[in-house]
Amino acid sequence: FKGDGTNTYIQAGTGGGSGGGNTFGDSSGAGGGGGGIVFVAAFTFSGTGTIQAKGGNGGDGSTAGGESFYTGGGGGGGGGLLVIISSSISGGAISGQTLDVSGGAGGLKGGSSGTNGAAGSTGNTILLNG
């Protein structure tokens, strides 16, 4: 949860990653998509499971033809936002549930001189007892 302390704004899900660098305009990997937003309002939660708003992985740089050894991997997408309102929340957690707002992995470089894409940033989780 990110805000200004007075809750006049809330930072929602994060954006996708940027593409990796290259030298001669070859085909670098695409950036991964952002994790988006998941909003759940339920009186009770029971059982086990995973609720996720994960960022997508960045694409790998091209290794086909041309000067492909210069292509970079795409950046991983940032994790999204989970908002859960439930009377089942206790101590800032939901029993039996795994919450995942991780960023995506960066793509691999296309050859010896490219650069790997960076991983996406971790998203945010808001748990409210309601």
Image (spheres, grey):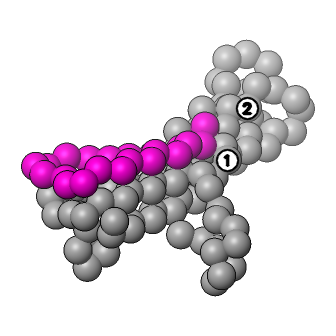
Q: In the rendered image of this protein, does residue 66 appear above or below residue 72?
A: above
How packed is label 2: few (under 14 Cα within 10 Å), some, or many (20 or more)? many
Query: Residue visible at 58% across and 59% down?
Result: 121
Segment tinted magenta in the rendering: 32-53
**Horizontal relation, residue 45 to residue 52: left or right:** left
Q: Amino acid at mark 1?
A: Gly
Q: Residue 59: x percent and y percent?
A: 60, 32
Q: Amino acid at mark 2?
A: Ser
Residue matched to label 1? 15
**Horizontal relation, residue 25 to residue 50: left or right:** right
Q: Earlier in the sequence, mark 1 or mark 2?
A: 1
Residue matched to label 2? 28
- Is 42 one of the magenta-colored residues? yes
**Horizontal relation, residue 31 to residue 130: left or right:** right
Q: Secondary structure at mark 1?
A: loop
Q: Residue furthest bottom?
A: 5
